[in-house]
Every structure is written in C-alpha cells, then in structure tokens.
Image: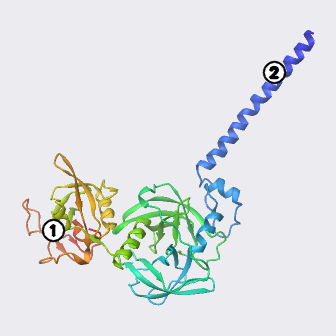
Amino acid sequence: MLLSGFIATRTVLTVLIFLLGIAPVVSVRVQAQQTRRDDPLMEFTASPGVQTPSVVDETIRFGVSLSQLYELAEPCLVEVLWHSGTPGSTDTAFCVDPEGLYMAVNREARKGDRLTLRKGADKIRTEVAAVDSLTGLCLLKAQEEFEDDLIHLRLRREAVLEPGEVVFGFHGFGTGAGEPCVAGRLVGRDSSYFGETLPISHLRIYMNLAGGPVGGPVLDESGAVVGVLTRRKLENPGEYHALPAALIEKMIQDYRAFGDSGPAWLGASFHVQSTTPQIISVREGSPAVEAGLLPGDIILRLGDRRVQRLSDMVDACYLLLPGQGTDVEVIRGLERLTLRCTPVLYSERPSRQSGKTKPDKASDGTPEVSFDETHPHGDLLMDEEPSATVGEPVGN
C-alpha cells in the first residue's frame, strides 16, 4: 500500500514538473508571436524581386495581407499618359469617385489639359478638371469609361494619421517588380524641407518602392487613402513625400461647388518670427474683419483642426473651403472666444493697394513688409525684417 502510494505521488510530481517545464516555453513562444503581431514591420518589406510570402505570413508581419490590399487597390490604379509637359510613363493615377474622378500629380499640368489613362490595353480620354499649382495635385475627369466596372478608393482624414503608423504603397508601372504592394511607415510631417517652405505639410513616408511611382496612393491598413506620392526627391533613399488625403478631399469638394479648386482667403497675417499663431494684422474688407478677428488674437482652432503652432495654422488655412462658414477659436487677452468666419476664393479677394497690407510703420514701429508674389504662403505670413518678402497667398 505504501509502495503504491509512493509511486502514485511520484507520478503526479513528474507530470507537474513536466508541465511546469514546458509552460515557460509555451509562454515565450506565445509572447514572441504576439510581439511579431504588435509590430507589423518587424520583418520589413522585401526588395522588389523577392518571392511573395504567403497570405498567412503577410498577415503576421504586417497585420494585413499585401495581396489582399493589392486586390483592393488594383482595379482603381491606372497609368497616366500626359499629352504635354513632363512625360509620365511611370506616373500613376487612382480613382477616388464613382463619377470618374481620378487623382494624379504633375506640376506642369494646367486646367483643361488633355491626357490619356491606360489600364492594360484599355485607354480612355481624360482632361485636367482642376489643379493645385503649388503642389501639382491634379483632379482628372474621365471623358469615357473603362470596359471594367469603375471602382474607387475611399479617403481617410489625414488628421488622425500618427507618425509610426504602417502604410502601404505600390510600385510604378512597368518596373517589373515582384511584389506590387509594399509596406512602409509614416515617419513624420514636413512643413519645410532643406530650407524650402512647403505650401502645405507633406507626409514623409519610408517605403522600399521601385519605378518612381508618382501619383500613386498611400493606403492605411484598412485600404483607405492617406496620401498621394509626389515627384519630390528626398535626401535619404527610400523616403518619399506624400500630399495628405485632406487636400484630395478639399479639391473634390471645391470642384463640385465651383467647377474648379483653389486656395481660400481670410485676410489675416501672422508673424514668421514666432511659432505661436498670433495675428499681427487683418486686411480691410476681408472675411477676418467681418468675423471680428483682431490683431493680437491667438488662434487655437480653425474648423475641426487644432492649431498649436504656426505650421498648423498654415495647413488649416490651406484646407479651408471657400464659401463655407468655419468656427475660429481664439485667445484674446484672458478671454477664449469662438468666432464664425466665411473665407472666400483667393481670386475674389479685394485688390491690394500699393502692394502692402499694412502701413509703412505700425504703431509699435514695425517696418513695412514688401511682397514679391512668390512665397507659398503670401500675406498669411509676415516677417518683421524690412528685407523679408512674402508673396502669393495659399489658403489664407
């Protein structure tokens, strides 16, 4: 009896020791697998030409299947054949609206330009319906339909996209790259780059792409468009600039309202010597004056966009919709106020007298500001230095 009890006890202890021994191993394996899922780029995208991984492996690495993303986007991607200006054998456009609206990028394009969109052997005639001359973003209107059913990509508001998020892009046409869909990361936003002031903050993307896929969409994990790739060359290999999806949304809404797209105008000017978005002057007869904005007001929010620094204000102004009332939240002394402002098209602003928006000398002795009509932010931004110049307004 004692012997059988001892054997039974020993057997139980052996089983417990065995279970305790494998438990850490199971835990470690599960934890390692979870870590791989938490960081979808733990195994970063392979170079073009590398064999495509299985859907299961892709899902573990990226949290989403590259093949499934490509299947979602491929019917919306077309090749752009520009009839004039910069040849675009590798340029890409993508459909964003069931009415046959496409997005592309070309700084040389002008409204009314004719071009051809190609998908395989199928070609359709298209024209430039609207263009943002400062960024080169083009809205294309198809004059015909492709044989296949029209499919469009949906847009995601850029405001909720955080640096570090995984994004996805596509190689340019005719590259012969192995895997057409490639994973990358949003690494930041640039309001200027190597001393050049950008008209609107660009998304900086790290992505191992081939073929210079200008105009190609940048997608999030759900397949929504977060940006469109530009032609700009960046210093670091594998880095690209992309225009935010919010600019695409603005262009579409402008086109539907006015048959064109362009910057809105508020008529308020801000210091460039400070990152605080504080108004230093308002233009007579401007929407800013009608809204009750005053010099000294500090902007906290413009529409649905929070403003913390001057670059935020520039972006928010760029994306304003002309003719649409917008709430402006400001600090005025100890007060916090919300005013209502309705911007107008920049082309409809009142004419500037003597090329100046304020007297030669302000009450505090600030020197005059001259204009050369070339700076991308115009009279939205003003420099206190006498030699400083600002020029063509964008979204102010």
Q: Amino acid at mark 1?
A: Arg
Residue at the spot x=59%, y=65% of the render? 182
User: Residue 40's mark?
Assistant: none
**Between marks 2 and 1, how big is the CA–CA gap?**
86 Å
Mark 2 or mark 1: name the one nearer the start of the chain: 2
Q: Residue furthest top?
A: 2
Q: Position of residue 386 (x, y in %)?
A: 15, 68
**Place of residue 119 in the rendered image (x, y in percent of width and height, measured from the top left):** 59, 81
Task: Identify which residue is drawn at 29% across, 60% down.
Answer: 313
Residue at left offset 39%, top offset 63%: 190
Judge whether 329 appears above or below 373 on screen: above
Tag 2: amino acid: Leu
Identify which residue is drawn at 60% across, 77% down: 149
Q: Give residue 283's mark.
A: 1
Q: Secondary structure at mark 1?
A: loop
x and y percentages locating residue 196 in the rendered image: 34, 69
Disc 2 vs disc 1: which is toward the camera?
1
Q: Which residue is mark 2?
A: 13
Q: Are marks 2 and 1 in contact (CB under 8 Å)?
A: no
Where the N terminus falls, by quadrant?
top right
